[in-house]
Structure formats: structure tokens, C-alpha cells
Amino acid sequence: MIHPERATALFLAALAWNSAFAVSLSLDASTTWADNISRSALAADQTDAFFHDAHLTASHLQPLATGLSLIAEASAGYEVVPRFPQNSAYLGGATAALRKKFGIGAFAPVLVSEIGLQRREARIAGDNSWIASGALRFSQRFTDAWRASISGDWEQHYAAHSTFDVRHHRLFGTLTWDITDRWQLSGGHGRLWGDFDANASWSTWGRALGGLISPVVASYYNTISWEVTNAYGPGWVTYRVTGHSDFWWLELSPALGANTSLPLRYEGSTTVNRAGIKYEQYGWTLGVLHRF
Amino acid sequence: MPRIFLHSPAPVLACLLAFTCHTSRLAAGNVVVIVKDTKGQPVTDAVVSLIPLEASAPAPLHPPVEPVVISQHGEEFDPYVTVVAVGTHVSFPNLDSIRHQVYSLSKTKPFEIPLYGSGTEQSILFDRPGIVALGCNIHDWMSAYLVVVETPHFMKTAGDGVARLAELPAGRYRLDVWHPRLAGESRRDLVVAAADAATQTISVTLKPDRRIRRAPDGAGGGYK
Ligand SMILES: [Cu+2]
């Protein structure tokens, strides 16, 4: 349980720390309208819902040498789906990144390598996990207004139950256009390879295992980890499959001063598992990012 | 910040000859320059300089003995625009708790001050006229301009768009106006008469502000 007084005291302590040790504190909160939040394959199972999340991050940038900086971050957050509270989770963790700039000036290319470890405390006991991650990002500014980056990242969940032991890696590109000093438009496209969790109602799951969807699906689904989680209704099943996902997003982000922005994002993904089952998801997200 | 009267012992020495001083004051004029944009709004941070056109010898510049200060505070440069005469030293004190790495890639004066924290002062001599665009290699959004002029008659416009240039020896001058967002060039010739106060209103076309955005970027999308 999080007590409001304790959270306030923690926040005030972090602010004091912030001014004393060049630690910058930031808040990232967002609300998403998720189309097919349950990541279900069959139209009858697809469920839409609001998803809220908020993260507080303390970060410290330490220049080490010319062109080389260390960025250390610690964050804590909470995610909730009010319609399906079973899916709420607390998250806390730390990352360390090395930022190498090749040359002097805003137009010098930058390479960031990052490693992280996070703890996820979920309502679904099997989803309690340690998450290890690594990322490599190369970015280049072309003009004051345009920049691009290419990122590769990897993530491994060590969960309480094997259903949630997902491991995947992604490769994606981002293009950012600062239209004016206030308005920013950015977009990205990429692909994920590896494991992901999906959900099905009990009746759909029974048909899939029984071969009523296709023999290929039945033979694959009889080899994978699954469990009844009631994540999106009584008897609902969460299962772990392997495949790939193509994802993209478009984000319009007005700045409210030097330290705040309000990104509005539309994103989509098409995910296909090894048995050829396809999952389509879309989402609208309105967020607020603020540096204290 | 008025920098018309450059603090240097030279004028004091010159004034030992009371007669000379008296004569120059009699022959001095004042010019008030008002810089406005095309909508008639006052333009702040415009650099106004007057270059004598008839002088037989170049006007003495009298750069200040103490360095002019461009500080780093709150991960920004302060001030955004500074104007100095050729031969001026400028120091870049860091008032933040994070280290900065100030540089210029401008042809007028390329330089780089390696990473430094608060309490370290290093000044740089600006020995050629021109525009110096300043940046910080740690914080890409930090930007400032230093304008180095080859005349003792210069000033930066305040919030009301006004620059007052006083004690100008009578004669013909070229009036230059520069601004970080100026489209094209703005210069004109004018005659300063002794004991006269002339007002020059200059309309400039400004380009949109194209500074690197500081507001936080979103994490982007892409499912995990
Ligand atoms: Cu800096």
C-alpha cells in the first residue's frame, strides 16, 4: 500500500535531493484509450479500456570526459486499468546509460547505451517479475528542427510464473520535427521479435486447445505456458507466445514552457504469433511530461 | 546593459588635458535608435553599432580591463546576446551545480572550454570582429550570441527596443543593426551633428525563433 503522507514526504525529500545534488526530477503521466487492450485475436474477445500510468524519475547526468556522460536514473510508477483492476502494477527500478557524443555541437551524432533493472509488483501474482533491459540508440540532428534516431533494445522478464517470462528485442526508428518552438511532431516505426503475452476468454481458449480454430493453433498452443488470470473477465486466460510485432506511432507534442510538454500520441501494432494468429491494437494516449 | 562608456584608464588619462576633453564634448552628438519589427513591436536584444566613416584614424576601442561576463545559470546562457569591442576578454562562469562545456564553431572565434563546474573561471579574448554563436556540448538547447564590433560606439536594445548612443564625435557613420533572427542585413549611413540628438527608427524583418527545443520529449510509442 502507498500512503499519501509517505508519498508526499518521499516526493519532498526527492525535491530537496534534486536541488542539492543536480538530480533532476521528472513526472511522466498518461492516459491511454486502448483498442483491444486485452491483446485478443478473436473479435468477440477484443476489449477496449482506459489505461492510466504515472512514473516519477530522478535522473543525474554526470559529464565524465569530453563527449562522454553518464546518466543514472531511478524511477517508480504505477499502472492501472480501472475497468480491469486485475491488471494494475507498481514498477520501480534503475537504469544507467553512457552517452557518447562524436564531436562538438548540437549536430554531432550521439550514441547512448543503457542497461536497466526493474521490479514489477503486479496484482496477478504470476506477473511479479524482475525485468532486465539493455538498449543502444544512435541519434543525429540535421537542422535545428529535424532529427532522427535508430534504437535497438532488449528486455527479459524473470517472472514468478513462466507465462510471464517474456523475452524480446526491438529495432525502431524515430523522426522528430520541431515545427515551431512550441509544437513538435514525431513518429516512429519498428519491429519486435520474441515473446509476448496475449489473452483469451475461457470459451475461446477451450476451442483453441481443442483444435476447433485450426490444428496448427492447437498443436502450438498445447506446448506453451498459460494460466487462468481472470485478467479481462472471469475465466480469462493469459498465454505466452512467440512471434513478431510491427508497430508505429505519431505524436504531436506542444511544449508548455521549457520544462513541460503534453504529448498526444496515436499508435498501432500488428502482432503475429508462430501459429499465424494475428492481433491488432490501436491506442490514443494523452500524456504530461514535467521536469521539476 | 549600457556599454557605451568602456571602463579603461585611457579616457581618464586623455582628460588630463582639460582642453581636449572640453572640445570633444562640444563636438559630441547623441543618437537614439529604436528597433521595431514589421508589426511595429519593439525588438529586444538587437545590437546597434555605429562605425565612423570619415575618421582619419580608427576610433580607439578601449576594451574593458575586467572581462565581460556570460554566465551559465539554470542550464541557459545569461545574457542571450552580448556585444563587445574587439580586444575584449569574456569569461563564462558556471553558476549551476552541473558541469558545462561551452564552445563556438563560428569562424570569428572557434573555441572550446573543456568541461568545468562552478568556481572555475576562464576568459577568452575576442580579437576579431564578427558574430560568435555559443553553445554547450552537454545541453544542446543552450545557445547565446556574442557580437564583436570594431567600434567603441555600440549598444544592445532593451525591452523597449531602444538603444541610446551618446558622446559621438560629429561626422558620418554607418549604422549596423544585428539580431539573432534578423532576415538579411540592416545598415544605413547617417550624419551625427555636434550637440544634436537624432532619433533613428529602424524596422527589421525577423525570422521565426529557431532555437533547439528544451521541453521534454515523449518516450514515443512502440509496444513492449
Ligand atoms: Cu551545459
Image (tube, helix red, strand yellow):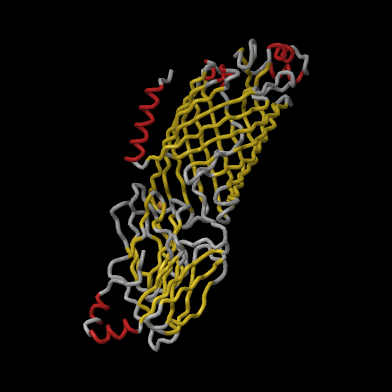
Q: Taking B202 as reference, is A229 above or below it? A: above
Above or below: residue A107 compared with residue A83:
below
Q: Position of residue A284 (x, y in %)?
A: 64, 33
Q: What is the residue that sits farthest to the left in this orientation? A: B16
Q: Is residue B103 left or right of residue B6?
A: right
Please give the name of the residue rendered at 42% of the width and 60% of the height, measured from the top-left corner.
Answer: B103
Answer left or right for A195 relative to A106: right
Q: Is residue A251 left or right of residue B81?
A: right
Q: Quadrant of residue A13?
A: top left
- Judged from this view, the residue extending furthest toward the bottom is B56
Please provide percent x and percent y for residue B136: 43, 55
Assign the N terminus of chain B to one quadrant of the image.
bottom left
Quarter of the figure that contains the C terminus of chain B: top right
A171 over A118 or under it: above or below: below
- Exactly how many numbered labels are in the figure? 0
Q: Which residue is pictured at 61% across the width and 41% down the height?
A: A251
Which residue shows up at 52% across the image and 70% down it? B202
Q: Position of residue A182 (x, y in %)?
A: 55, 48
Q: Nearer the viewer, residue A20 or A224?
A: A20
Q: Quadrant of residue A272?
A: top right
Q: Position of residue B39 (x, y in %)?
A: 57, 61
